[in-house]
Amino acid sequence: MNMQAQTPVYIAEYADNELTIGLKGVSNEETEQRVDAIVRLFCCLHGRDVFIKYYSKRLATRLLNKTSISREAEEAMLNKLKVECGLNTVNKMSQMFTDIQLSKDLQTEYDSKHGALVAGISFQAEILTNGTWPVDTTITCNIPPSMKQCTDKFTLFYKNKH
C-alpha cells in the first residue's frame, strides 16, 4: 500500500465517501467498525501528512456544504485520529466544528432579531477562523448589488456583537 504515492489521497477520498453517503442507514456499531477500519489503514500509512491534508479539505467541504451524514461519526473519526497523531495535528479540524456551531448559533440569533429574509433574500453566513480552514487560493468575491444589503446588515450585526 505504501508503494503507491496516491494511497493517502485514496484513503482520504474513501473516508469522505463513507462520511457522506456510505454510513447512511448504518447502525452505530457498524459505523464504529467502519471508522476503525479507516483509522487502521491510516496507521499503516507512511504518508500520514498527505492523508491529513486531503482529509481536512474534504472535512471542510462536508461541513460547509452540510453533506456529512453523522456528526457523531465525524467526531469519532477525529478522536481516533487524535489518538494516532496527536492533538496538534487534529486541532485545526476540531476548530472547524467549533466554527460551524458558533456560526449556526450566531445565525439563529441574527434571524431572531432581523428575520430570515433580507430584501426577500434568504441569507446565511459562516464565520470561519482564519488559518484553520484549508484554502489553497484566495477567491475574490464580487457581491451582486441585490445581496449587498444582506451582507452589510449582517456585518453591522456582527460588529455590534463583537
Image (cartoon, rainbow, N blue to C red):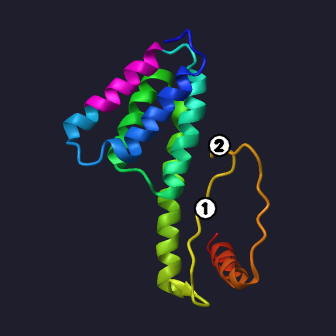
The reply to whether residue 129 is visible in this rendering is yes
Q: For mark 1, does the 10 Å Cα neighbourhood hold few (<14), some (14 to 19), or many (20 or more) residues? A: some
Q: Secondary structure at mark 1?
A: loop
Q: Is residue 123 above or below residue 61?
A: below
The residue depicted at 64 percent of the width and 73 percent of the height is 158
Q: What stretch of residues is rendered in magenta? A: 33-44
The percent coordinates of residue 46 (x first, y second) are 55, 13
Task: Give percent across and percent down for residue 63.
Answer: 50, 52
Residue at x 64%, y 77% (from the top left corner): 154
Q: Is residue 100 above or below residue 15?
A: below
Figure check: 43 above or below 124:
above
Q: Which residue is mark 2?
A: 134
Mark 2: amino acid: Pro
Which image quadrant for residue 43?
top left
Which of the two marks, 1 or 2, is nearer to us in this view?
2
Q: Quadrant of residue 8?
A: top right
Give how far across and how far down residue 159 sits, in percent.
68, 73
Residue at the disc numbered 1: 127
